[in-house]
Image (cartoon, rainbow, N blue to C red):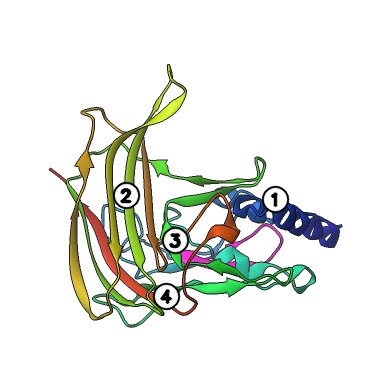
Amino acid sequence: MKKTYYFSIIVVLVSCATFIFMASCRKYIDDTPVVKTPDELLCQSNITGGCFDQWQSIDDGYGLICMEPAGNYLRTLNYLTTLPSSVGGPGPLTTDSSRDSHSGTYAALLITGTFSPQGDPLIIPGLVGTDSLDIPNATIHLGKRFTARPDSLQGWYKYVPVGGDSAMVSVLLSKYNVAAQKRDTIGLLRQIYHNTVYNYTFIDLPITYYSAATPDTLTLLICSSAGINFVDLLACKGQVGSRMWIDEISFVMP
């Protein structure tokens, strides 16, 4: 039964060339049980888990385990590592803890990888952010509830691109417009990094506001390859092996 279920998901992926259906072999990840979590979340960042010093094991609902930043807020694409061999798995580990940190025990290491479940290689960027899986609706939700208006995003990073690749840090603050039935952009930042940076470098990225409204959602994405595409996985662009270290991210509040 399980094998048939996994196979049907891969058929959907190949026929639709859509990344969000790839996730359908998982339960909604925010509802899945945490196998092992720290007794206490030590991170003092105003982005839950943004210190990256603690990581936790999460069960995909079928007894298969992937690692995520502790705190149940920031997510990765590491659930791909739990795909069985019957459908071309396991997928690549594209986000890992790294002892090469700016401060504390660990940083997050994002590594662009490749995955070939049906023979055609797909670029899978390393990613950490506010993404979560909604399996009942066969999609990925980008965003978590957030109602503040920070001035900027700060943190520390290193980047070693391959073949002219580029990394991305993106913050979108939005609010659902009931009358228009769409999301309004409240604030936005998008920073692209092209150059090799071997030593940890401080970032302080201002958020540009387009409205005085209070947001209701934060979409934070940090990617080792900026050409990520959440609609069509075959359209993702990047170079395998590009690496980005990110550590101690937080918002500066007014």
Query: Relative to 11, does residue 243 appear above or below in the rendering?
Result: below
Q: In which quarter of the image is residue 64?
A: bottom right
**Residue 125, image x and y in percent?**
48, 67
* Mark 3 vs mark 2: in front: 3
**Residue 143, image x and y in percent?**
43, 44
Give the Cα separation between the discs numbered 1 and 2: 28 Å
**In the rendered structure, which disc, 1 or 2, sits on the residue that comes first in sequence?**
1
**In the rendered structure, which disc, 4 or 3, sits on the residue that comes first in sequence?**
4
The residue to which callout 2 is attached is 171
At 46% from the left and 80% from the top, the residue drawn is 241
For residue 92, say whether it is visible: no
**Residue 86, image x and y in percent?**
80, 70
Checking the image for residue 97, the label placed there is 4
Which range of residues does the magenta coloring cover? Answer: 57-69
Give the Cα separation between the discs numbered 2 and 4: 22 Å
Does dot 2 land on a helix, a strand or a loop?
A: strand
**In the rendered structure, which disc, 3 or 1, sits on the residue that comes first in sequence?**
1
